[in-house]
Image (cartoon, rainbow, N blue to C red):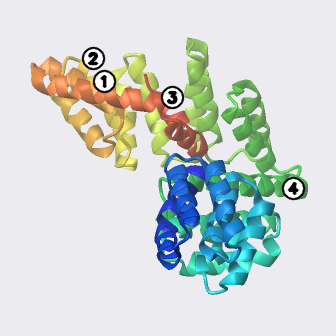
Amino acid sequence: MVRSAKFCTALLSRLFLFAAISVAAQTNDATIRMHRDTAAAALKANDLPRAEREYRAILSIDPRNVEASSALGVALYASGDFSEASAALQNALGLDPAQPRIQLFLALTQAELGQCTQVLPKLEGQWKDQADPRLRRLAGLSTLDCELAAGHLTAALQLAEPLKTQYPDDPDVLYKLAGLYSRLWNETASKLIQKHPESYRVHQLAGEVYEAQNNGEQAIREYSLALKENPRVAGIHLRMGQILVQKGDAESETKALVEFQQELEIDPESAATEYALGEIFRRRQDYAQAAQHLQRAVALDSALAEPHIALAQMFIAQHNPQDSSREAAIAVQLDPRNPKAHYALMVAYRSEGKMDEAGKELSLFQQLQHDHDNNFNNKLNILLTGKAGMRQTSN
């Protein structure tokens, strides 16, 4: 579930080096020393099968060698041979019951064998008390897997936050949490559909799913059904307008204007809707209307960078680079990793004749644009948080 062969070989090299040296110090058997050294070299080369053979060779000479038995168990765990790993680790634990790391890897191995009910308390204890962050991570991920396997979604959710806090950039942690959140979403959505099949929320949910799948036509049909059941639902007209804007033709844009205006009738405090309206009027070069809506968006939500970017673009079109650079600089301050903000500031600086500053902004824009295009996590975040629509309404 959570093992990593590379991680485990590195762990073996570090965790069992001292123990192997102590064994060598306690015995004059040259053969054991040879196998120990060969196993160490195999681990450095990330050659687990070879290391396993060397540990087995040591055990054939000294069956009660705790360090070799435990090292073999960890190596087998990393290789995915869980039955053999369990046997080796149980043997090591029988020889020395006071070894917490052996207990941890035995619990991890048994969890992989589907014995979560028996080992979950041990994994929870290791997650709570383990001092080594690498081993604590393994315990946490395995505990999460077992909670999910048992259907303990509340317990899994309670574990998710500290895992994310302690290992914020760990790919395994992020992957597991994505699976957890997806499962929670699926189960909740299924319950909604089963318990309230005629609810407008079902159509709203279906519309969001179709929208995420880039099926705009079907999404609009579902959103329309939701509004038929409840015409005062906030956010749906905004979503429909955003889908229409993406079509890129004049007729769809005109329909989008109607949707955005209807959204404001339901939610007059919607900064996103004011921004969307301002963008349409900006593209139509109706700058008076554009400024009215964009400034209203800024007043409603001072943390949004997009309205400032649109204002900067509008001021450049009106040959007003000073006001453009002011708005673009605010956007950069609000969202330093927004490539459009840096591009707008670059254009404004060029218009002001500030070529050095413009060059710096161009470099930042190019780097951020490259990162944006190649960063899957960013794209996934946009999809899951529903923020794509706002950005897609701008040029």
The residue tagged 2 is 317
Gap in angstroms between the C-alphas marked 3 and 4: 32 Å
Q: Which percent across, then down, holds residue 11?
A: 52, 61
The residue tagged 4 is 196
Q: Nearer the viewer, residue 3 or 329?
A: 3
Q: Which percent across, then down, holds residue 270?
A: 49, 46
Q: Amino acid at mark 3?
A: Gln
Check disc 3 and report its element: helix, strand or loop: helix
Q: Amino acid at mark 1?
A: Gln
Q: Considering the image in quadrants, where does the C terminus appear?
A: top left
Q: Which percent across, then down, holds residue 106?
A: 70, 72
N-terminal label among 4 and 2 = 4
Check disc 4 and report its element: helix, strand or loop: loop
State the mark number for residue 392: 3
Q: Nearer the viewer, residue 277 or 139?
A: 139
Instruction: Please tell me how crowded label 2 is: few (under 14), some (14-19), or many (20+) other residues with Cα within 10 Å.
Output: some
Instruction: Point out the residue furthest to the bottom here.
Output: 98
Gap in angstroms between the C-alphas marked 1 and 4: 46 Å
The residue tagged 1 is 313
Q: Considering the image in quadrants, where does the N terminus appear?
A: bottom right
Q: Is residue 35 above or below residue 315?
A: below
* Residue 142 figure quarter: bottom right
Q: Is residue 395 above or below residue 48?
A: above
Q: Amino acid at mark 2?
A: Ala
